[in-house]
Image: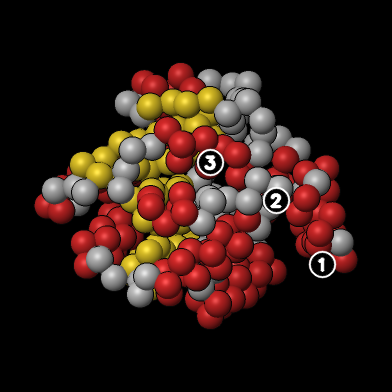
Amino acid sequence: MHISIIIPAFNEERLIGQCLRSVTEALAANHDFAFTHEIIVVDNNSTDNTANLAKKAGARVVFEPINHIARARTAGAAAAIGDWLIFLDADCRLNTGLLTDIFQLIKEGKHVGAGSTLLMRGLPWWANAILKLWTMLSVLFGWAAGALMACNSKAFHEIGGFNLELYAAEEIEFSQKLKKWGQAHHLKFTILTAHPLETSARKIKLYSRREVFGQFLRLILHPYRSLHDKKWLSMWYDGRR
């Protein structure tokens, strides 16, 4: 079994190193599975040292010129040769237990894919409440967070991958399509909860509470326009790091 770990990255020179170290350490701790692997970093038109740092860390770097998270993930998948794809955001740390859970799921052969619950440290109470709400919805409806998605490569290509018309929330539609494909092939899709993925809380630190709630209000009042136009998604695309 060959595993492709795909990490989209836009101006991530501050965090890409620790992300790749966590991946390398988690892979080493799970060597008993005897899976082969590749690590692909998708440089999504960065203007900093992201690509060079990724190469120095041993990752294969591919380039996607259009700053768009779905396109970056798609470019990584196009370059990948794995039987399974694991999409991991560059501001995350992959822990050994979570990778063990993913590898065990792959080994058992009963799933088409999986997501994970999230851990964010140092959140204010209101942001922690939002995370708890997302966790409840994620587990209840089987929606994978974009920070980590694992899936069978064949399924990925047969469902058409990510919707390139969406600039955010494409992971929810992707999860739904994976579940539908899995049902047709008698395979499950699950959200792993035992070892939450640690992801950066930088958006909460970089944006004021007013900006955060303003972004969510735009999504609620104008969902179609917001998701299809990155000008309406400043928290994802204004480049603040």
Pointer 1 and pointer 3: residues touching (CB < 8 Å)? no
Q: Position of residue 64 (x, y in %)?
A: 58, 28
The local crowd at label 3, few if under 14, some if 14 to 19, many if 20 or more residues have their Cα within 10 Å, is: many
Compared to residue 222, the image places residue 75 above or below, namely: above
Q: Quadrant of residue 65?
A: top right
CA distance for labels 3 and 2 = 13 Å
Q: Which residue is rendered at x = 50% and y = 46% of the image?
A: 89
> Would you call the spot at circle 2 few (<14 residues within 10 Å), some (14-19), or many (20 or more)?
many
Q: Secondary structure at mark 1?
A: helix
Which residue position holds label 3?
74
Amino acid carrying mark 1 in the image: Ile
Residue 220: give its label: 1
Gap in angstroms between the C-alphas marked 1 and 3: 27 Å
Q: Is residue 204 left or right of residue 195?
A: right
Q: Evaluate whether residue 125 shows in this view.
A: no
Kind of residue at disc 3:
Thr
Question: Badge 1: few (under 14), some or many (20 or more) residues near its Cα, within 10 Å?
Answer: few
Is residue 232 visible in this depiction of the protein?
yes
At 56% from the left edge and 59% from the top edge, which residue is drawn? Answer: 174
Numbered label attached to residue 166? 2
| Above-or-below relation of 195 to 186 | above
* Of pointers 1 and 3, the one earlier in the residue sequence: 3
For marks 2 and 1, give the one nearer the viewer.
2
Colouring mode (rainbow / by chain / secondary structure / one colour)? secondary structure
